[in-house]
Amino acid sequence: MPHKTIRGTIQYTSKKPDRMDQERGREYFTITRQADGVEVMHAHCEIDDSPNVIRDIVMAFKEDASPLDCSVRLSVGDRFEGSGWMRFTDTTAELESINHRDGRISQKIELERPVRWLQSHPICGDSILMRRYDLTKGAGKQRMDDMYLTSPDHRGATGPLLFKAGFSIVYLGEEDVTVKAGTFKARHFQVTDTAGELPEEHPPYDVWCTADDDYLFLKAGVGGYMQTHYELVEVTRD
């Protein structure tokens, strides 16, 4: 086969004292690396917390994680919230969408620099984002600008639209990590410095991914008012 596909399931749980380790959602994903180097991510995401969220994503990106195109369909509280399509070139980002709150939306943004990553909110994509960190510089903190989100909401429960943001990625090194899907050599990253970039500051977010070219999501956690945990529970690699 000229392409390679990873299939997996991620479990969402709570770390709040009154809901410790209770399941609060799940995600089913595939990531296919084609012979031309383009990768295509499919993700079906379910958040049970009220109002519940169902999100379906199809996103294509280059090996360095820079986006090519993306489609999003979103339901909130078992009601259609929005649907949209995005396309990116080195000089332009554009969107066509419709959502429950705002109706039809068209955006065309002229870019000074190419978009480095599109955060479309599936958890499996959070580890792919870490490809943007330059490992040749070792452990430390690197600023990430020229990023876009499909929603500034922490649950990705609005839009879709194109929302520009920036933040920092901290690389904390390698370690062995055991999750329900197995034991892996992992890289540990943290997303931070979102103050002033989002309507509400996101607490520091720790992410572990495989220490290889796949950057496969293994686990993640966030504290603060969110107190959530995410873990890879099943995976197959073709």
Image (spheres, rainbow, N blue to C red):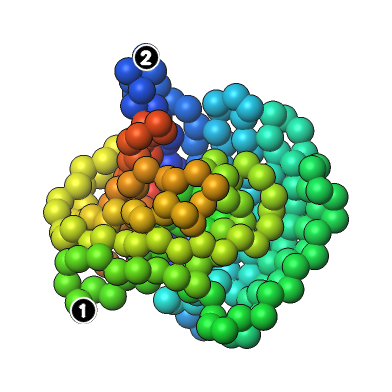
- Circle 1 residues within 10 Å: few <14, some 14–19, many ≥20: few
With respect to residue 76, does 127 lie above or below? below
* Residue at the farthest top position: 18
**In-image side of 73 versus 57 (left or right):** right
Q: Which residue does the numbered mark 2 point to in the structure image?
A: 18
Instruction: Identify the secondary structure beneath mark 2.
Output: helix
Query: Disc 1 marks which residue?
Result: 136
Q: Which mark is residue 13?
A: none
Q: Is residue 229 above or below residue 122?
A: above
Identify the residue at horizontal 61%, vertical 52% (top origin): 151
Q: Is residue 138 visible?
A: yes
Q: Is residue 73 visible?
A: no
3 or 193, nearer to the observer? 193
From the viewer's perspective, is 120 left or right of 128?
Answer: right
**Which kind of residue does numbered mark 2 sit on?**
Asp
Question: In the rendering, at what x and y percent does residue 10 appear?
Answer: 43, 41
Write the residue at 79% across / 43% down: 101
**CA gap, disc 1 and disc 2:** 43 Å
Q: Residue at x 54, y 41 (%)?
A: 155
Q: Position of residue 113 (x, y in %)?
A: 53, 83
Mark toward the start of the polypeptide (1 vs 2): 2
From what the image shows, is residue 48 above or below residue 173?
A: above
Q: Position of residue 161 (x, y in %)?
A: 68, 57
